[in-house]
Image (spheres, coloured by chain):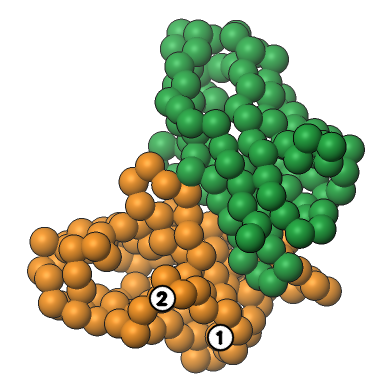
Amino acid sequence: GDSVTQMEGPVTLSEEACLTINCTYTATGYPSLFWYVQYPGEGLQLLLKATKADDKGSNKGFEATYRKETTSFHLEKGSVQVSDSAVYFCALPNTGNQFYFGTGTSLTVIP
Amino acid sequence: DTGVSQDPRHKITKRGQNVTFRCDPISEHNRLYWYRQTLGQGPEFLTYFQNEAQLEKSRLLSDRFSAERPKGSFSTLEIQRTEQGDSAMYLCASSPPRDRGPGELFFGEGSRLTVL
């Protein structure tokens, strides 16, 4: 069945370091792909999405490219900030109305 | 700007008691979802409503769980005869009408259940 496999954390980085959080997926067809973020004490919110192969989603300095050949949707940021400390979830919808979420990767950025 | 609201935010109960959670979605959203999240895991789908109709239910949703959305607006999730394994964060999300398939989900902050 459809699923996402996400890089396990936790991840601790110094401010201005580069970030990559890996996400690979298994799906029937070519679904849209999403990254959600959960800041401390808040609900999950959409960070970025890509709707078809080779699309790049971007928001708040984060990017992820939908790569069909490697079935991946890795999240990247060139220079992280303390305010990026959060839990990041990769997600994909099935052909119905469900979303499959990864297990989440906790990121802590230290000054 | 009113987002998805959930009540209560925290509930502590004894094993065997019944609990009910309420979710108020964003007003123009006709799609409503319940998810469950345990520590160190991503959200797991429980059930989905389109307007007042419950269209999908996960196998995770045992007979002790029931969800309603009587007028297509707010929704309730009731757990009867709670067990310690029910301890989790219960998340509600909503999304606007789409031609097909799910779009972006807008989540509430969740209702945390602790069963003693």
Q: Residues within 10 Å of mark 2 (few under 14, many from 20)?
A: some
Q: Quadrant of the C terminus of chain B?
A: bottom left
Residue drawn 67% across and 39% down?
A: A24
Establish if B39 lies above or below B70: above
Q: Quadrant of the N terminus of chain B?
A: bottom right
Residue type of the residue flagged with mark 1: Gln
Chain coloured orange: B
Q: Amino acid at mark 2?
A: Leu
Q: Secondary structure at mark 2?
A: loop
> For the point 18% across and 63% down, which residue is it?
B84
Vertically, is A12 above or below B112? Answer: above
The local secondary structure at tag 1 comes to strand
Q: Residue at x 72, y 36 (%)?
A: A73
The numbered dot on residue A34 is none
Q: Which chain is green?
A: A
Asked if residue A59 can be seen in this view, the reply is no
Residue B61 image label: 2
| Disc 1: which residue | B54
Label 2 is found on which chain of the structure? B
Q: Residue B23: x and y, percent?
A: 44, 71
Instruction: Report the chain holding disc 1.
Output: B
Left or right: B80 in relation to B44? left
Which callout, 1 or 2, points to the residue nearer the camera? Answer: 2
Q: Out of A110 and B64, give the one closest to the viewer.
A: B64
- Residue at x 76% of width, y 59% of height: A28
Q: Position of residue A89 (x, y in %)?
A: 56, 42
Quick one: B56 or B2, which is closer to the camera?
A: B56
Furthest residue to the front? A1
State left or right for residue A69 relative to residue A60. Answer: right
Asked which quadrant contains residue B78, the reply is bottom left
Q: Is residue B17 left or right of residue A66?
A: left
Q: B73 or B39, which lies in front?
A: B39
